[in-house]
Amino acid sequence: MDGILDFNQLQHEHKEWSVHNFPGQTPEEIILKLGEETGELMGAYAHLTREYRGNKKRWAMEIEDAVGDITIVLAGVCSALGIDYQITVEKVWKDVKQRDWIEYPTNGITE
């Protein structure tokens, strides 16, 4: 690995790559791609847990690939919609990590 890649760098590099490779791509096309990649994750997980066609190592590798693809496509979604990927993930994680679903099973925060 070349080093740590943060969401800002990923978003910037992905935008340059995407403009070069897919000029004129619409937000709708990028969001559909996200759905495609999510479907691949779900399919690989189903195969892994049910041991369909192939071995567990193959499906584990497919899951890793799908997770990476989803992360990369999300950078494209953010760029297309004018969202700062880094700030968004940091902000949402700050809120999510405050939730305690064991202590507050109704809403994760107060009850």
Image: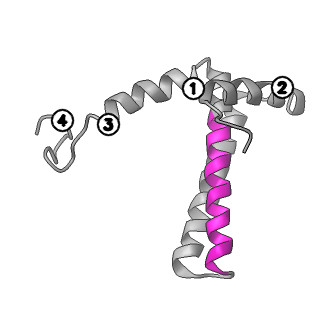
How far is the residue under mark 4 from the one under mark 3? 10 Å
**Residue matched to label 1:** 85
Identify the magenta region: 55-74
Residue 70: say if magenta. Answer: yes
At a point 69% along the width and 43% down the height, the residue shown is 33
Spatial CA distance of label 2 from label 3 is 35 Å
What kind of element bears circle 3? loop
Identify the residue under disc 2. Answer: 19
- Image quadrant assignment for residue 107: top left
- Where residue 42 sits in the image (x, y, percent)? 56, 61
Q: Which numbered mark, 3 or 1, is in the foreground of this view?
A: 3
- Residue sitting at 68 percent across and 26 percent down? 9
* Percent of width and height locating residue 3: 69, 37
- Cβ–Cβ below 8 Å for labels 2 and 4? no
Q: Secondary structure at mark 1?
A: helix
Query: In the displayed structure, does residue 11 sit left or right of residue 46?
Result: right
Tell me the mark number nearer the camera, choosing from 2 and 3: 3
For the residues marked 2 and 4, what is the alpha-carbon distance in whole angstroms? 42 Å
Q: What is the CA distance from the residue labelled 2 to the residue labelled 1?
A: 17 Å
Instruction: Give the residue type that dot 3 points to.
Output: Lys
Badge 1 local density, few (<14 within 10 Å), some, or many (20+)? Answer: many
Kindly identify which residue carries mark 4: 109
Q: Which amino acid type is marked by label 2?
A: Val
Q: Where is mark 3, residue-wise?
A: 97
The vertical placement of 72 against 60, above or below, is above
| Helix, strand or loop at mark 2 | helix
Q: Earlier in the sequence, mark 2 or mark 3?
A: 2
**Quarter holding residue 47:** bottom right
Residue 92 vertical position relative to residue 41 in the rendered view, above or below: above
